[in-house]
Image (spheres, rainbow, N blue to C red):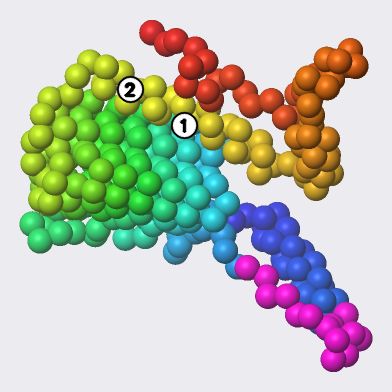
């Protein structure tokens, strides 16, 4: 941090300290009737030691998620609610267009029993289902990890491979391209069909588009939220038959229209 950066940091600390002092003063003036609110110290992006997350500006990290330390998140990727990505003793790398769904855990290992360094590397257009655990493993582009699956140190999931929901993949297992593995411990179940391979890419695209909607919603201010609440109340009781009798035509406000690109039957076809 340069001289200017240190000066700005110092001024920021003074301002925050002044605000805290004013809050304490206000509580004191309220006497026994005051309510002291405990502010959450949760940080979605958090440094650890000298390691800081690097998140592309077009990626979506949901409020309530935790991205900690040496973590890279690529363009169009999404980290959903309740996820924890902890890159403290090693690194986590996530490509573009990948989605890590709600309550999933991505972690690393400094080394394992075989003495190998174990970062976690997740490629592009990968779908990781809800509550999955990925620990010191590698998942190539356009692979699919089902809900509640666990991938242990050294696991390698090749492109267009699928780990079924609830599977436990043992250490140093390699899942070849085009195969579905499942069970505890995981083993080969069958080959993927061409339709299923296409679905993996489409699933990632759907989540990329859906993340844009969530990012926009989370960025809305109080006035926008209040306006939409009022519009929903106005239009939820609309009786189309009664309107037609009166000759009234009511157009749904654009604020209440779900974007076409997140609906499965309206997603534009890709090459």
Look at mark 1 in the image and give the residue it sits on. Answer: 207
Q: Does the stretch in magenta take in 256? A: no
Q: Is residue 263 left or right of residue 184?
A: right
Figure check: 114 above or below 95: below
* Of the pair 178 and 118, the residue shown nearer to us: 178
Report the disc number at residue 199. Answer: 2
Quadrant for residue 259, please give it: top right
Residue at image point 34% right, 32% down: 126
The C terminus is located in which quarter? Answer: top left
Nearer the observer, 31 or 115:
31
Instruction: Give how far across and how far down residue 149 sits, in percent.
Output: 25, 48
Question: How many labels, in total?
Answer: 2
Query: Which picture quadrant has residue 147?
Result: top left
Circle 2 residues within 10 Å: few <14, some 14–19, many ≥20: some
**Can residue 95 be spotted in the picture?**
no
Nearer the N terminus, badge 2 or badge 1? 2
Q: Which residues are magenta?
A: 25-40
């Amino acid at each position: 941090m340069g001289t200017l950066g240190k000066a700005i940091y110092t001024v920021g600390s003074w301002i925050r300290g002044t605000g805290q002092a004013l809050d304490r003063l206000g509580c004191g003036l309220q006497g026994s009737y005051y309510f002291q609110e405990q502010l959450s110290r949760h940080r979605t992006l958090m440094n650890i030691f000298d390691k800081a997350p690097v998140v592309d500006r077009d990626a979506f990290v949901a409020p309530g998620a935790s991205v900690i330390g040496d973590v890279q998140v690529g363009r169009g990727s999404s980290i959903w609610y309740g996820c924890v990505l902890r890159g403290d003793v090693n690194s986590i790398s996530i490509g573009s267009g990948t989605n890590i769904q709600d309550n999933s855990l991505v972690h690393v290992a400094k080394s394992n029993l075989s003495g190998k360094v174990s970062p976690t590397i997740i490629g592009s257009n990968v779908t990781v289902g809800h509550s999955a655990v990925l620990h010191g493993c590698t998942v190539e582009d356009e692979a699919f990890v089902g809900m509640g699956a666990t991938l242990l140190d050294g696991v390698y999931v090749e492109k267009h491979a699928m780990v079924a929901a609830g599977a436990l993949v043992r250490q140093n297992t390699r899942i070849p391209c085009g195969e579905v593995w499942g069970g505890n411990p995981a083993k080969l179940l069958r080959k993927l069909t061409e339709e299923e391979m296409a679905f993996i890419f489409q699933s990632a695209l759907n989540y990329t588009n859906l993340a844009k909607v969530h990012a926009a919603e989370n960025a809305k201010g109080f006035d926008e939220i209040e306006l939409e609440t009022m519009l929903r109340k106005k239009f939820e009781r609309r009786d189309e038959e009664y309107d037609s009798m009166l000759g009234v035509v009511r157009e749904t406000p654009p604020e209440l229209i779900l974007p076409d690109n997140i609906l499965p039957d309206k997603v534009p076809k890709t090459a």
